[in-house]
Amino acid sequence: MSWYQYIYGGLTAMSALAGVFFLRYWRLSKDSFFVWFACAFWTFAINWYLLAEDHGVAEHSPYIYGVRLAGFLQILAAILLKNRARDP
């Protein structure tokens, strides 16, 4: 077991925890912005988990990149939807 797996495990846990915090903020405010961010951080947690479990894959492989891209697109969607909602 390499030390990369420990780091990826920690990143997985912290990303999942950040998603839980955003979900808690959504429960308080009912703003969909926080749901989008929670889903994005859970997607990042999946990304780090896949890197920890698959020993032969690099960070720049297509399916790992695709998962990370999905997370960033969720963040972009949250920002765009929040800014669009402000327009009269």
Image (cartoon, rainbow, N blue to C red):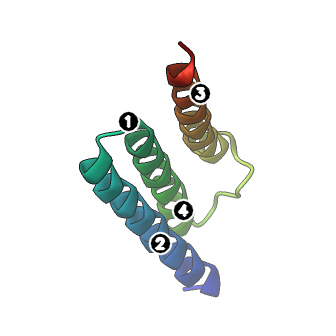
- Find residue 7 and report its horizontal and vertical position in percent: 58, 80
| Image quadrant in which the N terminus is located | bottom right
Q: Secondary structure at mark 3?
A: helix
State the separation of the CA atoms marked 1 and 2: 22 Å
Dot placed on the residue nearer the N-terminal end, 3 or 4: 4
Residue reaching furthest to the left: 27
Q: Amino acid at mark 1?
A: Ser
Relative side of 16 to 11, left or right: left
Quarter of the image holding residue 75? top right
Residue that numbered label 2 is attached to: 14
Q: Secondary structure at mark 4?
A: helix
Residue reaching furthest to the right: 60
Q: Amino acid at mark 2?
A: Met
19, above or below 34, in the image: below
Q: Secondary structure at mark 2?
A: helix
Dot placed on the residue nearer the N-terminal end, 1 or 2: 2
Residues tagged 3 and 1 counted as in contact (Cβ below 8 A): no
Number of marks: 4
Which residue does the image show at 26% across and 53% down from the upper left?
28
Residue that numbered label 1 is attached to: 32
Mark 4 crowd level (few <14, some 14–19, many ≥20, 10 Å Cα): many
In the rendered structure, find residue 48 and report the number of the disc placed on it: 4
Mark 3 crowd level (few <14, some 14–19, many ≥20, 10 Å Cα): few
State the separation of the CA atoms marked 3 and 4: 30 Å
Q: Amino acid at mark 4?
A: Trp
In the rendered structure, find residue 83 and report the number of the disc placed on it: 3
Residues tagged 1 and 4 counted as in contact (Cβ below 8 A): no
Q: Secondary structure at mark 1?
A: helix
48, above or below 63, in the image: below
